[in-house]
Protein backbone atom coordinates (compact mmCIF):
# COMPACT_ATOMS: atom_id res chain seq x y z
CA UNK A 1 0.00 0.00 0.00
CA UNK A 2 1.41 3.37 -0.97
CA UNK A 3 2.52 5.53 1.91
CA UNK A 4 0.40 8.60 1.36
CA UNK A 5 0.50 9.96 4.90
CA UNK A 6 3.30 12.44 5.67
CA UNK A 7 3.89 12.46 9.43
CA UNK A 8 4.54 15.80 11.12
CA UNK A 9 5.38 16.73 14.71
CA UNK A 10 2.58 19.18 15.48
CA UNK A 11 -0.46 20.97 14.16
CA UNK A 12 1.66 24.07 13.43
CA UNK A 13 3.91 22.05 11.14
CA UNK A 14 0.85 20.42 9.58
CA UNK A 15 -0.58 23.85 8.82
CA UNK A 16 2.75 25.07 7.49
CA UNK A 17 3.14 21.99 5.33
CA UNK A 18 -0.35 22.29 3.92
CA UNK A 19 0.23 25.95 3.17
CA UNK A 20 3.40 25.07 1.20
CA UNK A 21 1.61 22.31 -0.72
CA UNK A 22 -1.37 24.56 -1.44
CA UNK A 23 0.98 27.08 -3.05
CA UNK A 24 2.44 24.26 -5.17
CA UNK A 25 -1.10 23.18 -6.13
CA UNK A 26 -0.67 19.81 -4.41
CA UNK A 27 -3.91 18.66 -2.77
CA UNK A 28 -3.55 17.59 0.87
CA UNK A 29 -5.68 16.98 3.94
CA UNK A 30 -4.77 17.43 7.61
CA UNK A 31 -5.44 14.37 9.77
CA UNK A 32 -4.51 13.16 13.24
CA UNK A 33 -1.65 10.68 13.02
CA UNK A 34 -3.01 7.11 13.35
CA UNK A 35 -1.73 5.15 16.32
CA UNK A 36 -0.60 2.17 14.20
CA UNK A 37 2.21 3.90 12.30
CA UNK A 38 5.04 3.32 14.75
CA UNK A 39 5.01 6.76 16.33
CA UNK A 40 4.12 6.52 19.98
CA UNK A 41 2.87 10.00 20.59
CA UNK A 42 0.14 12.30 19.33
CA UNK A 43 0.66 14.37 16.22
CA UNK A 44 -0.71 15.38 12.88
CA UNK A 45 -0.12 14.19 9.36
CA UNK A 46 -1.00 15.19 5.85
CA UNK A 47 -2.82 12.82 3.55
CA UNK A 48 -1.50 13.54 0.07
CA UNK A 49 -3.28 11.38 -2.48
CA UNK A 50 -1.16 10.51 -5.50
CA UNK A 51 1.70 12.97 -5.04
CA UNK A 52 3.14 12.13 -1.62
CA UNK A 53 6.74 11.55 -2.83
CA UNK A 54 6.85 14.92 -4.53
CA UNK A 55 5.15 16.55 -1.54
CA UNK A 56 7.64 15.10 0.95
CA UNK A 57 10.60 16.32 -1.12
CA UNK A 58 9.09 19.78 -1.36
CA UNK A 59 8.43 19.94 2.38
CA UNK A 60 11.91 18.77 3.33
CA UNK A 61 13.45 21.26 0.91
CA UNK A 62 11.33 23.98 2.54
CA UNK A 63 12.72 23.17 5.97
CA UNK A 64 9.62 21.46 7.36
CA UNK A 65 10.31 18.79 9.98
CA UNK A 66 8.98 15.55 8.48
CA UNK A 67 8.87 12.57 10.86
CA UNK A 68 8.28 9.95 8.18
CA UNK A 69 5.68 8.33 5.98
CA UNK A 70 2.92 5.84 6.58
CA UNK A 71 0.27 4.02 4.64
CA UNK A 72 -3.27 5.20 5.03
CA UNK A 73 -6.22 6.74 3.34
CA UNK A 74 -6.49 9.71 5.61
CA UNK A 75 -9.85 8.73 6.96
CA UNK B 1 -14.13 60.63 28.62
CA UNK B 2 -10.79 61.66 27.18
CA UNK B 3 -8.47 58.67 27.31
CA UNK B 4 -4.75 59.46 27.30
CA UNK B 5 -3.36 56.37 29.05
CA UNK B 6 -2.72 54.30 25.97
CA UNK B 7 0.72 53.23 27.17
CA UNK B 8 -1.11 51.21 29.82
CA UNK B 9 -3.53 49.78 27.26
CA UNK B 10 -5.08 51.23 24.15
CA UNK B 11 -8.69 52.32 24.31
CA UNK B 12 -10.98 52.15 22.47
CA UNK B 13 -10.21 48.98 20.60
CA UNK B 14 -10.96 49.07 16.87
CA UNK B 15 -14.43 47.74 15.95
CA UNK B 16 -12.75 45.07 13.81
CA UNK B 17 -10.97 43.72 16.92
CA UNK B 18 -14.17 43.63 18.94
CA UNK B 19 -15.93 41.79 16.11
CA UNK B 20 -13.06 39.32 15.76
CA UNK B 21 -13.05 38.47 19.50
CA UNK B 22 -16.83 38.12 19.50
CA UNK B 23 -16.70 35.88 16.44
CA UNK B 24 -13.91 33.80 17.98
CA UNK B 25 -16.04 33.13 21.06
CA UNK B 26 -18.88 31.92 18.85
CA UNK B 27 -17.08 30.22 15.97
CA UNK B 28 -13.64 29.19 17.25
CA UNK B 29 -14.20 27.93 20.77
CA UNK B 30 -12.50 24.62 20.01
CA UNK B 31 -9.13 23.35 21.13
CA UNK B 32 -6.55 23.58 18.34
CA UNK B 33 -3.78 21.03 18.02
CA UNK B 34 -5.66 18.43 19.97
CA UNK B 35 -8.54 17.07 17.89
CA UNK B 36 -8.83 15.94 14.29
CA UNK B 37 -12.45 17.00 13.80
CA UNK B 38 -13.10 19.90 11.43
CA UNK B 39 -13.79 22.59 14.08
CA UNK B 40 -10.52 21.86 15.88
CA UNK B 41 -8.57 21.95 12.62
CA UNK B 42 -10.39 25.13 11.56
CA UNK B 43 -9.39 26.77 14.86
CA UNK B 44 -5.80 25.59 14.40
CA UNK B 45 -5.87 27.21 10.96
CA UNK B 46 -7.01 30.50 12.49
CA UNK B 47 -4.12 30.31 14.98
CA UNK B 48 -1.68 29.49 12.19
CA UNK B 49 -2.94 32.41 10.10
CA UNK B 50 -2.22 34.71 13.03
CA UNK B 51 1.30 33.26 13.36
CA UNK B 52 1.83 34.00 9.69
CA UNK B 53 0.52 37.56 10.09
CA UNK B 54 2.84 38.12 13.08
CA UNK B 55 5.80 36.63 11.19
CA UNK B 56 5.22 38.96 8.24
CA UNK B 57 4.59 42.00 10.45
CA UNK B 58 7.88 41.59 12.34
CA UNK B 59 10.08 40.41 9.45
CA UNK B 60 10.62 36.91 10.78
CA UNK B 61 11.76 33.83 8.89
CA UNK B 62 9.41 31.17 10.31
CA UNK B 63 5.91 30.99 11.77
CA UNK B 64 6.97 28.43 14.37
CA UNK B 65 9.20 31.04 16.02
CA UNK B 66 6.10 33.03 16.97
CA UNK B 67 5.16 32.09 20.55
CA UNK B 68 1.80 33.17 21.97
CA UNK B 69 1.97 34.13 25.64
CA UNK B 70 -0.30 35.66 28.25
CA UNK B 71 1.26 39.10 27.80
CA UNK B 72 4.55 40.95 27.53
CA UNK B 73 5.43 40.24 31.17
CA UNK B 74 5.03 36.52 30.50
CA UNK B 75 7.17 36.82 27.38
CA UNK B 76 9.96 38.63 29.22
CA UNK B 77 9.95 36.12 32.08
CA UNK B 78 10.08 33.25 29.57
CA UNK B 79 12.99 34.78 27.68
CA UNK B 80 14.98 35.86 30.74
CA UNK B 81 14.50 32.69 32.78
CA UNK B 82 14.72 30.44 29.74
CA UNK B 83 18.02 31.85 28.53
CA UNK B 84 20.00 32.57 31.71
CA UNK B 85 22.10 29.91 33.37
CA UNK B 86 23.68 29.83 36.81
CA UNK B 87 26.59 32.26 37.01
CA UNK B 88 25.50 34.37 34.04
CA UNK B 89 25.66 38.16 34.06
CA UNK B 90 23.01 40.40 32.48
CA UNK B 91 23.05 44.06 31.44
CA UNK B 92 19.78 45.97 31.50
CA UNK B 93 19.03 49.61 30.78
CA UNK B 94 18.16 52.15 33.46
CA UNK B 95 14.74 52.57 31.84
CA UNK B 96 13.51 49.02 32.35
CA UNK B 97 9.99 48.30 33.50
CA UNK B 98 9.52 46.02 36.52
CA UNK B 99 8.63 43.22 34.11
CA UNK B 100 12.37 43.10 33.32
CA UNK B 101 13.84 44.45 36.55
CA UNK B 102 11.96 42.21 38.98
CA UNK B 103 12.64 38.80 37.40
CA UNK B 104 16.32 39.69 37.03
CA UNK B 105 16.50 41.10 40.54
CA UNK B 106 14.90 37.94 41.95
CA UNK B 107 17.38 35.67 40.14
CA UNK B 108 20.17 37.84 41.49
CA UNK B 109 18.81 37.83 45.06
CA UNK B 110 18.85 34.04 44.95
CA UNK B 111 22.49 34.06 43.88
CA UNK B 112 21.70 32.57 40.48
CA UNK B 113 22.93 35.45 38.32
CA UNK B 114 24.40 38.94 38.61
CA UNK B 115 23.37 42.06 36.73
CA UNK B 116 24.39 45.61 35.94
CA UNK B 117 22.08 48.54 35.22
CA UNK B 118 23.56 50.59 32.37
CA UNK B 119 23.00 54.33 32.77
CA UNK B 120 20.83 55.51 29.87
CA UNK B 121 20.18 59.12 30.84
CA UNK B 122 22.65 60.49 28.25
CA UNK B 123 22.85 60.63 24.46
CA UNK B 124 22.92 57.54 22.25
CA UNK B 125 26.72 57.35 22.16
CA UNK B 126 26.84 57.53 25.96
CA UNK B 127 24.23 54.79 26.28
CA UNK B 128 26.14 52.44 23.99
CA UNK B 129 29.32 53.16 25.93
CA UNK B 130 27.53 52.54 29.22
CA UNK B 131 26.42 49.10 28.02
CA UNK B 132 29.92 48.35 26.73
CA UNK B 133 31.49 49.25 30.08
CA UNK B 134 28.99 46.99 31.88
CA UNK B 135 30.08 43.84 30.02
CA UNK B 136 32.18 41.27 31.86
CA UNK B 137 33.38 37.77 31.00
CA UNK B 138 30.12 36.23 32.30
CA UNK B 139 27.74 38.52 30.40
CA UNK B 140 25.38 36.41 28.32
CA UNK B 141 22.37 38.67 27.77
CA UNK B 142 21.34 42.30 27.24
CA UNK B 143 17.71 43.11 28.01
CA UNK B 144 16.63 46.53 26.85
CA UNK B 145 13.39 48.39 26.36
CA UNK B 146 12.85 49.90 22.93
CA UNK B 147 11.39 53.01 24.56
CA UNK B 148 10.81 54.07 28.15
CA UNK B 149 7.21 53.54 29.21
CA UNK B 150 7.61 56.40 31.67
CA UNK B 151 9.44 59.06 29.65
CA UNK B 152 9.07 57.98 26.04
CA UNK B 153 12.83 58.06 25.41
CA UNK B 154 13.80 55.76 22.55
CA UNK B 155 16.98 53.79 23.17
CA UNK B 156 19.50 52.97 20.39
CA UNK B 157 18.55 49.30 20.42
CA UNK B 158 19.89 48.50 16.95
CA UNK B 159 23.35 49.64 18.03
CA UNK B 160 23.06 47.86 21.37
CA UNK B 161 22.07 44.63 19.62
CA UNK B 162 25.08 44.93 17.32
CA UNK B 163 27.29 45.61 20.33
CA UNK B 164 25.92 42.55 22.13
CA UNK B 165 26.51 40.28 19.15
CA UNK B 166 30.07 41.55 18.71
CA UNK B 167 30.77 40.11 22.19
CA UNK B 168 28.78 36.90 21.61
CA UNK B 169 26.01 38.18 23.88
CA UNK B 170 22.33 37.65 23.09
CA UNK B 171 19.89 40.55 22.90
CA UNK B 172 16.32 40.65 24.20
CA UNK B 173 14.14 43.59 23.16
CA UNK B 174 11.23 44.69 25.33
CA UNK B 175 8.88 46.03 22.67
CA UNK B 176 5.90 46.58 25.00
CA UNK B 177 5.72 50.26 24.09
CA UNK B 178 7.05 50.09 20.55
CA UNK B 179 5.40 47.19 18.71
CA UNK B 180 2.92 48.83 16.35
CA UNK B 181 4.61 52.21 16.62
CA UNK B 182 8.22 51.61 15.54
CA UNK B 183 9.27 49.48 12.60
CA UNK B 184 10.65 46.22 14.04
CA UNK B 185 12.24 43.79 11.59
CA UNK B 186 13.79 40.86 13.41
CA UNK B 187 15.82 39.49 10.51
CA UNK B 188 17.14 42.94 9.55
CA UNK B 189 17.94 44.07 13.09
CA UNK B 190 19.11 40.69 14.39
CA UNK B 191 17.25 40.61 17.72
CA UNK B 192 17.41 37.24 19.47
CA UNK B 193 14.19 37.73 21.44
CA UNK B 194 11.44 40.30 21.05
CA UNK B 195 8.66 40.57 23.64
CA UNK B 196 5.40 42.32 22.81
CA UNK B 197 2.08 43.14 24.44
CA UNK B 198 -0.95 42.45 22.27
CA UNK B 199 -3.21 44.96 24.00
CA UNK B 200 -1.12 48.10 23.67
CA UNK B 201 -0.16 49.51 20.27
CA UNK B 202 -1.09 46.34 18.42
CA UNK B 203 -4.70 47.14 19.47
CA UNK B 204 -5.58 43.56 20.44
CA UNK B 205 -7.38 42.38 23.56
CA UNK B 206 -5.74 41.96 26.96
CA UNK B 207 -4.30 38.57 27.90
CA UNK B 208 -2.33 37.97 24.73
CA UNK B 209 1.37 38.62 24.18
CA UNK B 210 4.16 37.53 21.89
CA UNK B 211 7.61 36.08 22.35
CA UNK B 212 9.33 36.27 18.98
CA UNK B 213 12.43 34.15 18.49
CA UNK B 214 15.15 35.45 16.23
CA UNK B 215 17.36 32.39 16.43
CA UNK B 216 16.91 28.64 16.61
CA UNK B 217 18.64 28.11 19.97
CA UNK B 218 16.46 26.12 22.34
CA UNK B 219 15.57 28.02 25.48
CA UNK B 220 14.49 26.33 28.66
CA UNK B 221 10.81 26.10 29.50
CA UNK B 222 9.13 28.03 32.27
CA UNK B 223 5.87 26.09 32.08
CA UNK B 224 5.41 22.45 31.19
CA UNK B 225 2.20 20.72 30.18
CA UNK B 226 0.13 19.36 27.34
CA UNK B 227 0.90 20.44 23.80
CA UNK B 228 -1.01 17.88 21.74
CA UNK B 229 2.32 16.60 20.42
CA UNK B 230 4.85 13.95 21.58
CA UNK B 231 2.43 13.17 24.39
CA UNK B 232 4.15 9.94 25.48
CA UNK B 233 7.38 11.82 26.26
CA UNK B 234 7.85 13.31 29.73
CA UNK B 235 9.93 16.11 28.24
CA UNK B 236 8.57 19.13 26.47
CA UNK B 237 9.02 18.99 22.67
CA UNK B 238 12.37 20.16 21.35
CA UNK B 239 10.78 22.31 18.64
CA UNK B 240 8.85 25.58 18.61
CA UNK B 241 6.16 26.71 19.18
CA UNK B 242 5.10 23.60 21.15
CA UNK B 243 8.12 23.80 23.46
CA UNK B 244 6.94 27.12 24.88
CA UNK B 245 3.16 26.82 24.50
CA UNK B 246 1.96 24.38 27.17
CA UNK B 247 -1.78 24.30 27.75
CA UNK B 248 -4.73 25.58 25.80
CA UNK B 249 -4.11 28.76 23.84
CA UNK B 250 -6.07 32.00 24.24
CA UNK B 251 -7.98 31.71 20.97
CA UNK B 252 -10.12 34.88 21.28
CA UNK B 253 -6.93 36.79 22.17
CA UNK B 254 -5.03 35.35 19.22
CA UNK B 255 -7.79 36.02 16.72
CA UNK B 256 -8.34 39.49 18.17
CA UNK B 257 -4.62 40.17 17.92
CA UNK B 258 -4.69 39.33 14.23
CA UNK B 259 -7.45 41.90 13.71
CA UNK B 260 -5.35 44.41 15.66
CA UNK B 261 -2.32 43.70 13.48
CA UNK B 262 -4.41 44.23 10.37
CA UNK B 263 -5.70 47.50 11.83
CA UNK B 264 -2.13 48.72 12.38
CA UNK B 265 -0.88 47.42 9.04
CA UNK B 266 -3.69 49.17 7.16
CA UNK B 267 -2.64 52.51 8.67
CA UNK B 268 1.10 51.83 8.65
CA UNK B 269 3.37 52.14 11.67
CA UNK B 270 5.12 55.16 10.17
CA UNK B 271 1.87 57.01 9.68
CA UNK B 272 0.70 56.15 13.21
CA UNK B 273 4.03 57.23 14.68
CA UNK B 274 4.04 60.52 12.79
CA UNK B 275 0.51 61.37 13.88
CA UNK B 276 1.09 60.54 17.54
CA UNK B 277 4.49 62.24 17.62
CA UNK B 278 2.85 65.36 16.22
CA UNK B 279 0.40 65.33 19.18
CA UNK B 280 3.26 64.99 21.63
CA UNK B 281 5.38 67.69 19.97
CA UNK B 282 2.43 70.07 20.03
CA UNK B 283 1.74 69.24 23.65
CA UNK B 284 5.43 69.70 24.47
CA UNK B 285 5.32 73.09 22.84
CA UNK B 286 2.24 74.17 24.86
CA UNK B 287 3.55 72.82 28.16
CA UNK B 288 7.00 74.35 27.65
CA UNK B 289 5.38 77.79 27.75
CA UNK B 290 3.59 77.11 31.03
CA UNK B 291 5.49 78.32 34.10
CA UNK B 292 4.07 75.73 36.49
CA UNK B 293 4.97 72.69 34.35
CA UNK B 294 8.24 70.69 34.41
CA UNK B 295 8.97 68.44 31.42
CA UNK B 296 11.70 65.81 31.69
CA UNK B 297 14.34 65.43 29.00
CA UNK B 298 14.93 67.17 25.68
CA UNK B 299 14.17 64.16 23.52
CA UNK B 300 10.92 65.71 22.29
CA UNK B 301 13.04 68.11 20.26
CA UNK B 302 14.46 65.13 18.35
CA UNK B 303 12.95 61.94 16.95
CA UNK B 304 14.28 59.86 19.85
CA UNK B 305 10.90 59.29 21.46
CA UNK B 306 7.79 57.18 21.41
CA UNK B 307 4.48 59.01 21.83
CA UNK B 308 4.66 59.41 25.60
CA UNK B 309 5.16 62.65 27.52
CA UNK B 310 5.90 62.87 31.23
CA UNK B 311 5.61 66.06 33.27
CA UNK B 312 4.94 67.45 36.72
CA UNK B 313 3.21 70.53 38.06
CA UNK B 314 5.76 72.43 40.16
CA UNK B 315 3.67 72.72 43.29
CA UNK B 316 1.52 69.60 43.07
CA UNK B 317 1.92 65.86 43.54
CA UNK B 318 1.59 63.81 40.34
CA UNK B 319 -1.28 61.79 41.80
CA UNK B 320 -3.09 65.02 42.63
CA UNK B 321 -2.68 66.33 39.07
CA UNK B 322 -4.14 63.09 37.68
CA UNK B 323 -7.01 63.20 40.16
CA UNK B 324 -7.92 66.78 39.25
CA UNK B 325 -7.78 66.05 35.50
CA UNK B 326 -10.07 63.10 36.07
CA UNK B 327 -12.56 64.88 38.31
CA UNK B 328 -12.68 68.21 36.47
CA UNK B 329 -12.56 67.09 32.85
CA UNK B 330 -12.89 63.29 32.82
CA UNK B 331 -9.35 62.99 31.43
CA UNK B 332 -7.61 59.66 32.04
CA UNK B 333 -3.84 59.87 32.52
CA UNK B 334 -1.33 57.82 34.49
CA UNK B 335 0.55 59.15 37.50
CA UNK B 336 3.22 57.83 39.86
CA UNK B 337 6.15 55.58 38.98
CA UNK B 338 4.57 53.66 36.07
CA UNK B 339 6.08 50.38 37.37
CA UNK B 340 9.47 51.73 36.28
CA UNK B 341 11.41 52.72 39.42
CA UNK B 342 14.77 52.51 37.62
CA UNK B 343 13.59 55.07 35.06
CA UNK B 344 12.49 57.53 37.74
CA UNK B 345 15.76 57.04 39.58
CA UNK B 346 17.53 57.77 36.33
CA UNK B 347 15.56 60.99 35.76
CA UNK B 348 15.53 62.15 39.39
CA UNK B 349 11.77 61.78 39.87
CA UNK B 350 11.65 58.85 42.31
CA UNK B 351 10.21 60.99 45.09
CA UNK B 352 7.15 62.24 43.24
CA UNK B 353 6.76 60.24 40.03
CA UNK B 354 5.33 62.01 36.99
CA UNK B 355 2.09 62.50 35.10
CA UNK B 356 2.15 60.59 31.83
CA UNK B 357 0.23 61.43 28.65
CA UNK B 358 0.05 58.79 25.93
CA UNK B 359 -2.22 59.25 22.89
CA UNK B 360 -3.34 56.67 20.34
CA UNK B 361 -4.64 56.77 16.76
CA UNK B 362 -8.05 57.63 18.20
CA UNK B 363 -6.87 60.79 19.98
CA UNK B 364 -8.36 63.96 18.53
CA UNK B 365 -7.37 67.59 18.32
CA UNK B 366 -10.23 68.39 20.67
CA UNK B 367 -8.87 65.93 23.27
CA UNK B 368 -5.53 67.71 23.32
CA UNK B 369 -7.10 71.18 23.52
CA UNK B 370 -9.21 70.16 26.50
CA UNK B 371 -6.13 68.66 28.17
CA UNK B 372 -4.08 71.83 27.70
CA UNK B 373 -6.92 74.05 28.94
CA UNK B 374 -7.38 71.80 31.96
CA UNK B 375 -3.69 72.00 32.80
CA UNK B 376 -3.83 75.79 32.57
CA UNK B 377 -6.61 75.76 35.16
CA UNK B 378 -5.33 73.02 37.44
CA UNK B 379 -5.52 75.05 40.64
Image: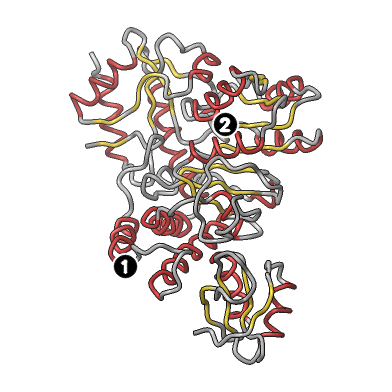
Closer to the camera, B53 or A70?
A70
How far across and how far down the image is residue B253, in percent?
39, 53
Q: Residues within 10 Å of mark 1 (few under 14, many from 20)?
A: some
The residue labelled by disc 1 is B27
Q: Residue at x 63, y 50 (%)?
A: B185
Closer to the camera, B107 or B253?
B107
Marks 1 and 2, the one that precedes in the sequence = 1
Asked if residue A56 is positioned above or below residue A11 in the image, the reply reads below
- Is label 1 in a helix, a strand or a loop? helix
The residue labelled by disc 2 is B302
Report how many numbered discs are placed on residues in the image.
2
How far across and how far down the image is residue B58, in percent?
58, 53
Kindly identify which chain the residue marked by label 1 belongs to: B
Mark number, residue B319: none
| Left or right of B44, for residue B170 | right
How far across and how far down the image is residue B118, in percent?
66, 20
Asked if residue B133 is positioned above or below residue B232 in the image, the reply reads above
Q: Residues within 10 Å of mark 2 (few under 14, many from 20)?
A: few
Asked if residue B292 is positioned above or below residue A47 in the image, the reply reads above
Q: Residue at x 67, y 44 (%)?
A: B191
Quadrant in the picture for the N terminus of chain B = top left
Mark 1–mark 2 CB contact (< 8 Å): no
Q: Disc 1 and disc 2: Cα gap in Å? A: 47 Å
Quadrant in the picture for the C terminus of chain B = top left
Closer to the camera, B224 or B341?
B224
Camera-side mark, 1 or 2: 1
Kindly identify which chain the residue marked by label 2 belongs to: B
- Is label 2 in a helix, a strand or a loop? loop
Closer to the camera, B42 or B171?
B42
Amino acid sequence: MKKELILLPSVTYAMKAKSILDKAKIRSFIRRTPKNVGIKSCGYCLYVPGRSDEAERLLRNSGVRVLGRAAGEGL
Amino acid sequence: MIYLDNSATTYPKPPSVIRAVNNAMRQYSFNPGRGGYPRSVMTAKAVYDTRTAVKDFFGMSAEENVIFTGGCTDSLNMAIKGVLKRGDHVVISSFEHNSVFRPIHKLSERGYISYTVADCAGKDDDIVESFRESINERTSLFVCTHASNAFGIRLPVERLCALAHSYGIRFCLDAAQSAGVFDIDIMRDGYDYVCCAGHKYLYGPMGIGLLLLGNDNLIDTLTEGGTGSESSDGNMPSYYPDRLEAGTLNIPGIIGLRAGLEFVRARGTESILNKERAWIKRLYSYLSDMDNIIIYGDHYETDRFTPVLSFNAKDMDSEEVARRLSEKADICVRSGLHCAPLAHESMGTSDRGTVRISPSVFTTDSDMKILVNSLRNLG
